[in-house]
Image: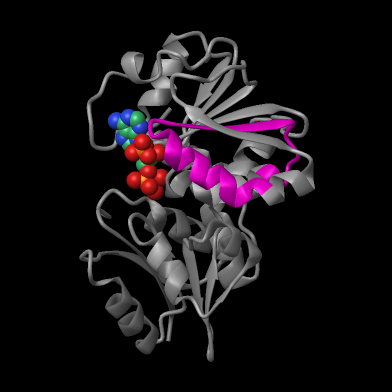
Amino acid sequence: MTDRYLVVGNPIEHSLSPIIHQAFAEQLGHELVYTKQLVTLGGFVECVREFREAKGKGMNVTLPFKLEAFKIAEQCCDLARHAQAVNTLSFEAQCCWGHNTDGLGLINDLHNRHGLKLAGSKILILGAGGATQGVLGPLLAEYPSRLVVANRSVAKAAALVAKFTSHAQEMGVSMHACGLDSVDESPAIIINATSVGVDDQDSLDHLFARIPVRGAFCYDMSYGNVARFKEWSEQRGAAQSVDGLGMLVEQAAEAFAIWRGVRPQTEAVLARLRSQSGHR
Ligand code: ATR
């Protein structure tokens, strides 16, 4: 039987994961089927059970199910444990493994594709939700000199930073939480991990008025027409502004490697997505 994989989320219709994984499979001469499925908010556990029973090999999990996926995984890799979120499930004979490839996807994109030196850098991350939680561990592992989490709700940023304080201390990283209007230093790298732009039309001029983007490398974890921070930071004098399409392809490559034992090349797949979708 052909190996089957699935990406689930809500919403899911715009997911590029099937295209990316089919492209990886073609590149490596693997035969597999990768589809997407919309799951109702209470339907995640049942969907996993059914897919596993039908001998599905692996699943990618996107919003809003990454925390539920962490809870149902029987074993988790260290990155997923730190993030307390899972974006990749791997179904083995006796065990459902949970992984989180988002952080590595981000680091690979920043480091390998965009040539950024993260060690010793001052990094500011905007947002304190699941997207931020998924990447803090891998960011700390790069030894930045300072990592600040700025969020609309300061209490949420503080709670998230508290979870990572001992890890940060071990790595010798100074880590802080603040509000979006009280960022006190100019970071070299700013990463937008808020969901602004996904479902609201707030003015970024208003929301991010105090974010020192001028001269910074600005990374938007969103892509496509919701990458509003990329566009906005470009207009506000960022040294460079990029979207998160590269991160998407890199996290997919990590998931493919977990499932199939070989890591695909990402550059050609990313170039193809950019030319097909018009995402610059
Ligand atoms: P995700 O899992 O994608 O991170 P989430 O957990 O809902 O989603 O978190 C969304 C993040 O975007 C949060 O940091 C949220 O800020 P609050 O914690 O203050 O709610 C941020 N966010 C969403 N919409 C926002 C807006 N209009 N202005 C500022 N921050 C916003």
Quadrant of ligand 1: it is top left
Which stretch appears magenta?
Answer: 140-165
Relative to 210, 75 lies left or right: right
159 part of magenta stretch:
yes
Give 19 or 161, whichever is nearer the viewer: 161
In the rendered view of the protein, which quadrant contains the C terminus? Answer: top left
Is residue 105 something that shows in the picture?
Answer: no
Residue plotted at (65% across, 36% down): 175
* Residue 94 in which image quadrant: bottom right
Give me the residue at 29% from left, 76% from top. 47
In the image, is 53 to the left or to the right of 91?
left
Residue 51, percent from left and from top: 34, 80
Query: Camera-side residue: 185 or 246?
Result: 185
Residue depicted at x 41% and y 86%? 55
Measured from the top left, where is residue 124 in percent x and y?
57, 28
Taking 184 as reference, is 42 above or below it?
A: below
Q: Would residue 167 be counted in the magenta stretch?
A: no
Name the side, left or right, on which 143 lies relative to 60. right
Residue 29 picture location, percent across and down: 56, 67
The residue depicted at 60 percent of the width and 59 percent of the height is 82
Q: Position of residue 279 (x, y in %)?
A: 39, 32
User: Is 228 above or below relative to 164?
Assistant: above
Q: Is residue 24 visible?
A: yes
Query: Could you say which is closer to the camera, residue 154 or residue 208?
Result: 154
